[in-house]
Amino acid sequence: MLDTWELYIRSIEGKQADETEFSNMILPTRLYELAEEYDISFNPDEIVPTDPSEIKDVYNAAIDLLLDVGIYNDSTGRIITFDEKEIKHHLKNLPGTYTTGADQDKCTISKRGFESKKLPPIIGGPCGAPISEDIYVPLMQSIAKEPCVEGLHTATPETVYGFEVRSNTPAEMIAARKELIMTREAIRRAGKPGLSIIGTMSGTTSEAQCFAHSSDGLRPTDRMLVSLLNDLKIDWDVIKKSMYCEYNGIGITNCMAPVLGGYLGGPETTAIGLTAEIISSFLLLGGPTINVTPPFDVVTGHQVFNEGFFALSRATAAITQNTNALVQDYCGVSSGMCTDNMIYETFAVAGSSVATGSDAILGAITSDAIRQDEYSGMNSRILDAARRSFAGMGLEEANEFVVKLIELYGGNEPSTFKPQQGKTFQELYDLKTITPTKEFTDHWAKMQKKISEMGLELEEF
């Protein structure tokens, strides 16, 4: 990453710009020019990119965007700029691997590449979704105990000691600390005390999130999630959190949660903008990897539309093909647990991510990460089957399956798409044994047969 002081100087001495002008004029104008210049266009029949020259064009367009537009510091109203030499220098010097966790629960994540038979590790968890405080530990335990899970991403407890958590208050700091304490108890009960934890999610401010750093909370073997603001922006709070991690020996995982149909525009321009954000994160935040969600549709909030997959798969492919950076895609789906569409959506997200070289996959996160308690270890078990079925598959074949899956659940029709509502963890798990109910396992067995009939190979039923 850039030297922290250098980043500060560029933030206060960069070109001044009005935030509205940057978001509404400077950024979208250049994005549309680049999409036209590089002839990047959305094709609903090619969600997974198959042409290396197209992938290179997305990457080059993203570099041009960073050079021409830069990153807007929301706290100072100034633009942080880069030159091409330093961008290439920072990307070239990324390690391409990192290790998290401790003792027998260590996990090493490294570059996979296109069509790799190497399985991307699964980092399980609700990934910030809301969980009732009283079932937080057993729900997280159900995920950690799955054999396929090699890391655990925290959720957001709905309350702390029964009280609502309000931002910018001491309660927010206490909630962030308790979130990590409860997550650590969950991995202890699961028999994986050294499992790496990624967090925190309860706090919105840097001081609250960093307050989770403690001997019984976030440790040096864990990862702090540090997220850029959307639409090529950053602020002092993000920089402060990154600095805290750097000076206290805490591993950083960069993060982005893009929006489709907002300031980045449609699928073509979002592909360019998201790739540029991923690249900039390695200069600004300091992590060896970045977690990226499928773009949220600005109108519906759903993540499973073909246009969003088009953008995410091209961004993942662009980084895979052209850099030593690591990309970890969230498997975020819109339908709930124990529904047919949840399975189809999970396989579609996993298929596009695994084929384009995602180095780890997070989730699966059901119900758009907004419904309370609708997450479980079975989500990761299903994701495990999906990653195995696509590992080693060619880009063209993977694209055919992904397009077919999207059509099955209606992800090619945003105006008529309705996610299937699922059930809660309490309804689908035995809370004493922390095991899924027969209803849940029977449904998964039924869906495995349907997936197999499509031509996807599953290792077991």
Image (cartoon, helix red, strand yellow):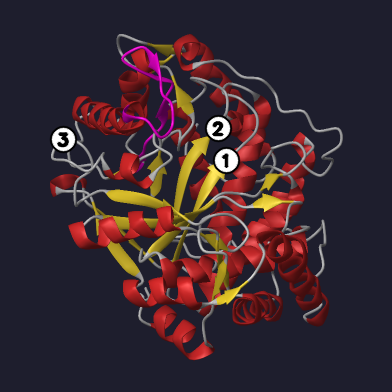
Give the image location of residue 380, x and y in percent.
45, 36
Alpha carbon separation for disc pair 3 and 2:
26 Å
* Camera-nearest label, 3 or 2: 3
Q: Disc 3 on helix, strand or loop? A: loop
Residue closest to the eye, 346 or 401: 346
- Disc 1 vs disc 2: Cβ atoms closer than 8 Å? yes
Give the number of the disc on residue 369: 2
**Left or right of 34, for residue 165:** left
**Left or right of 402, for residue 105:** left
The question of residue 153 being in magenta is answered with yes
Q: In the rendered structure, which amino acid carries the disc numbered 2?
A: Ala
Of the two numbered discs 3 and 1 on the same chain, state the one appearing first in sequence. Answer: 3
Q: Which residue is mark 1?
A: 332
- Would you identify the image quadrant in which residue 338 lies? top right
Residue placed at 76% from the left, 61% from the top?
24
Q: Crowding at label 2, few (<14), some or many (≥20) Cα neighbours within 10 Å?
A: many
Q: What are the residue bounds of the magenta stretch?
A: 149-170
Q: Residue furthest bottom?
A: 85
Alpha carbon separation for disc pair 1 and 2:
8 Å
Alpha carbon separation for disc pair 3 and 1:
29 Å
* The N terminus, quarter of image: bottom left
Give the image location of residue 114, x and y in percent.
54, 68
Q: Crowding at label 3, few (<14), some or many (≥20) Cα neighbours within 10 Å?
A: some
Give the number of the disc on residue 216: 3
Q: In the rendered structure, which amino acid carries the disc numbered 1?
A: Gly
Residue closest to the eye, 217 or 21: 21
